Amino acid sequence: GENVEQHPSTLSVQEGDSAVIKCTYSDSASNYFPWYKQELGKRPQLIIDIRSNVGEKKDQRIAVTLNKTAKHFSLHITETQPEDSAVYFCAASIGDSRLTFGEGTQLTVNP
Amino acid sequence: DADVTQTPRNRITKTGKRIMLECSQTKGHDRMYWYRQDPGLGLRLIYYSFDVKDINKGEISDGYSVSRQAQAKFSLSLESAIPNQTALYFCATSGLGQGEAFFGQGTRLTVV
């Protein structure tokens, strides 16, 4: 089955800096790659996703890039703010089948 | 708003007891999932169901069972709870042809 690895497990940045979280996947048939944000004590919520027919997608301060050849994808957050502090999960799936999640990254943005 | 609701939100139970976690949704989705969250291990899939007559094991199904009572209801049971099943459990749903999963609020289960 699919295996998703996520790095780093913890990331600390200064407010205003950029943050990058990277994931690799094993199944070349995977074609849907969402990113979820989980604030403390809350449920995971989708923040951005990308499908394999595009290489990059942006939504304001967040962007996701996908390299199908290398089987990795990354989340980029620019101009970080304290409210970006949370656990971020990447995931992968084939079409609309079940998602396989990475282990999560605890992002801390220091004021 | 259409939502995914889990009950109970918190539960403490003793080793060897049977416990059921319930999930209901008003999103009209066919697909429902049970995940377990442990620190440093991410969200691991326990069971999933793509419609009322479909039940599939996930990566960590041992010690768990499920029941899909209706399109809107999907329950997770621990037949004989053990301490290493202490975790945060999430139910999720997704629609046919849609990749996004919508999560419930979570159930924090402690087995003592």
Image (cartoon, coloured by chain):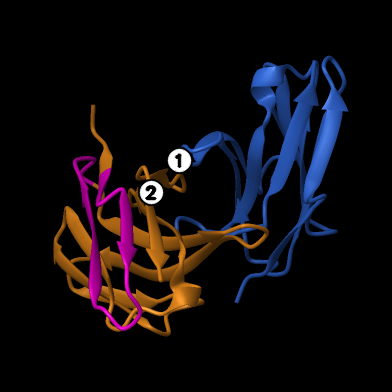
Chain colours: A blue, B orange
Image quadrant where one finds the N terminus of chain A: bottom right
Tell me the chain of label 1.
A
Picture coordinates of residue B104 (x, y %)?
35, 45
The kind of residue tagged 2 is Gly
Q: Which residue is drawn at 73% across and 16% down?
A: A81
Position of residue A54 in the picture relative to residue B72 (left or right) = right
Name the element at disc 1: loop
Quadrant in the rendering for residue A83: top right
Between residues B50 and B4, which one lies in front from this camera angle?
Answer: B4
**Mark 1 and mark 2 residues within 8 Å of each other at the beta carbon:** yes
The kind of residue tagged 1 is Arg
- Tally the numbered discs: 2
**Residue under label 2:** B106
- Which residues lie in the magenta part? B5-28
Q: Does A98 appear above or below B16?
A: above
Q: Which mark is residue A17?
A: none
Between residues A94 and B83, which one lies in front from this camera angle?
Answer: B83
Q: Residue A43 carries which label?
A: 1
User: Crowding at label 2, few (<14), some or many (≥20) Cα neighbours within 10 Å?
Assistant: many
- Would residue B24 be visible to someone looking at this image? yes
Whether B7 is among the magenta residues is yes
